[in-house]
Amino acid sequence: MTLQQLKYLVTVAEIGNITESAEHLYISQPSLTAAIHAIEKELQVTVFARSNKGVCVTREGEEVLAYARQVLEQAQLMEEKFCGENARNPRFSVSCQHYSFAVNAFADVVRKYESARYDFTLRETQTYEIIEDVSLGKSEIGVIYLSDKNEEVLSKVLKKHELVFEELFVASPHVFISKKHPLAKNESVTLEELEPYPYLSFEQGEHNSFYYAEEILSTFDRSKNIKVRDRATLFNLVIGLNGYTVSSGVLDTKFNGLNIIAKPLVVDETMHIGIIRSKNRVLSRYGETYVEAIRKYTSIV
């Protein structure tokens, strides 16, 4: 097999349509189909299931694509190291929980490697999808947290997916509330004081176990619960309903606005926030820059 064939596989998986992929790759549709059949025959697996609506990746195909993405990215690293700036065509992807510092760091990477052509992806998504994205090579880096409550289970999941966790910083839990919230003038707040107010958390889909919860103390029983999918909705409800959520305490007014404040939560817990990556994978220059940027934005924690 060749690097070009692997590129064909990854492109078809991302686009989901043979004809559109052929146009994107500037080759004929029959040539692309033949190339895919050839690599499927060589590997003795069916990478794509075909239908009238296009193609979808099979279970075996997901594993093939995970290796294909790693090979292509390692080849790009080699080109960048030995061929210099002429080989650079920035491509970088991150999957993360909903942290403003993760977005800030991503923006730093885009600004630093600005060029005529690049392909960057940032996915704020569910915890299990972050793990899956990194294990399948869809993202080079994932950003999650571990705690005493979820570490045992998530460490097993990471090991199963051949991923490693690298801690970046330790944070004490804070609540994000509106600056007009009745508790806004408190130096710190307790769970008992928060009981009358709606608790906002990020919905985790099929993996809605508290082990995958983005918020620490997810097992605590609350009478008012609201689950959402995106950060903008969550903060709108924090303001509109005097709700609250629990997070790291790292806030950025550019992303979260001036109406949201962080208050220390009086609990004996800590959040170990870090990145996950493939065990046998060297970070690209973009990945290294991203990690350095996260450290910069969280150095005051």
Image (cartoon, grey):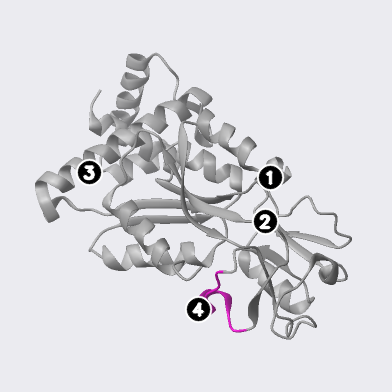
Image marks 3 and 1: residues in contact by CB distance under 8 Å: no
**Disc 4 from disc 2: Cα separation:** 28 Å
Left or right of 73: which side holds 263? right
Q: Sequence-wise, which precedes: disc 3 or disc 2? A: 3
Q: Residue 229 placed where, x, y %?
A: 66, 58
Residues at marks 1 and 4, CA–CA distance in whole angstroms:
32 Å
Q: Residues within 10 Å of mark 2 (few under 14, many from 20)?
A: some
- Nearer to me, 9 or 37: 9
The residue drawn where x is 57% and y is 60% is: 98
Q: Nearer the viewer, mark 3 or mark 2?
A: 2
- Give left or right: position of 275 versus 227: left
The Cα–Cα distance between marks 1 and 2, rounded to whole angstroms, is: 9 Å
Relative to 241, say whether 35 is above or below: above
The image quarter containing residue 82 is: top left
Residue at mark 4? 254
Q: Is residue 62 left or right of residue 216?
A: left
Tell me if residue 255 is in the magenta stretch: yes
Q: Which residue carries the number 3 mark?
A: 77
Where is mark 2, residue-wise?
269
Q: Where is residue 248, by image quadrant? A: bottom right
